[in-house]
Image: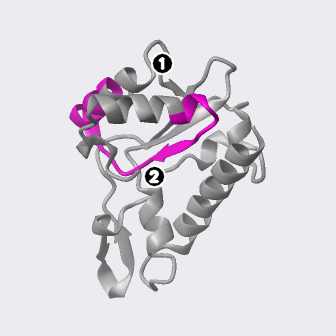
Amino acid sequence: MTQAANWDLTQAETVRLRDYLLRGGFLVTDDFWGPDEWAYFAEVMNRVLPNHPISDFVETDSVMHVMYDIQEKDRTYIPGSRHLYRGPGGSIEIAQQASSPAWRGMYDDKQHLVVAVNFNTDVGDAWEFADVPYYPAAMTILAYRYGINYIIYAMTH
């Protein structure tokens, strides 16, 4: 789900999403920014999964190691295409947002990750613009590693 702070779930949708997640479903959220959007997202997710906090991934979280070994140092800002501009000599520059990126999750009662939260970063744009020459290849490679880890984790846990 992209731009996760722009959704407005009805009560019926909230219940359906909760049922989906607690029956083994998996949700990846991405491309939302700053404290206001975080507060709204957290409020919605608290309705979806009450009493299931959103926590930062720690170095040992298996989702970060299921296929690719994503270390703490790899949790770097992945820009949206709107955060790129041409610099001197035609180089591509990244206008990083003021907020630090965060990778977080929500777990079910069995401690299986059911919601992966990409916050203050735009993993989806790195996938979407993978074939665009100006998009930084290193960011696309990292974004694919996150995505593949999420898919394999969701299929095996």
Q: Mark 1 highlights which residue? A: 53
The residues bearing labels 1 and 2 have C-alpha atoms spaced at a distance of: 23 Å
Which image quadrant is residue 91 in?
A: bottom left
Neighbor class of circle 2 (other Cα within 10 Å; few <14, some 14-19, many 20+) is some
Q: What amino acid is at disc 1?
A: Pro
Location of residue 77 with respect to 42 vertically, above or below:
below
Location of residue 106 with respect to 117 vertically, above or below:
above
The color scheme shown is one colour
Q: Percent from the top left, x then y, of residue 75?
A: 56, 46
> Label 1's element?
loop
| Span colored in magenta | 20-43
Q: Residue at x 64, y 49 (%)?
A: 150
Location of residue 46 with respect to 150 vertically, above or below:
above
**Residue at the extreme top of the image, as rendered:** 51
Q: Residue at x 59, y 25 (%)?
A: 107
> Label 2's element?
loop
For the residues carrying marks 1 and 2, which lies nearer the camera in this image?
1
Q: Is residue 33 left or right of residue 27?
A: left
**Residue at the extreme front of the image, as rendered:** 12
Q: Is residue 47 left or right of residue 66?
A: left
Q: Percent from the top left, x then y, of residue 129?
A: 44, 75
* Residue 102 - label: none
Q: Is residue 136 left or right of residue 89?
A: right
Neighbor class of circle 1 (other Cα within 10 Å; few <14, some 14-19, many 20+) is some
Q: What amino acid is at disc 2?
A: Tyr
> Which of the two labelled residues, at mark 1 and mark 2, occupies the earlier sequence position?
1
Does 21 appear in magenta?
Answer: yes
Task: Specify the quadrant that holds the C terminus.
Answer: top right
Q: Residue at x 37, y 53 (%)?
A: 2
Q: Mark 2 highlights which residue? A: 77
Q: Percent from the top left, x then y, of residue 40?
A: 25, 31
Q: Residue at x 74, y 36 (%)?
A: 62
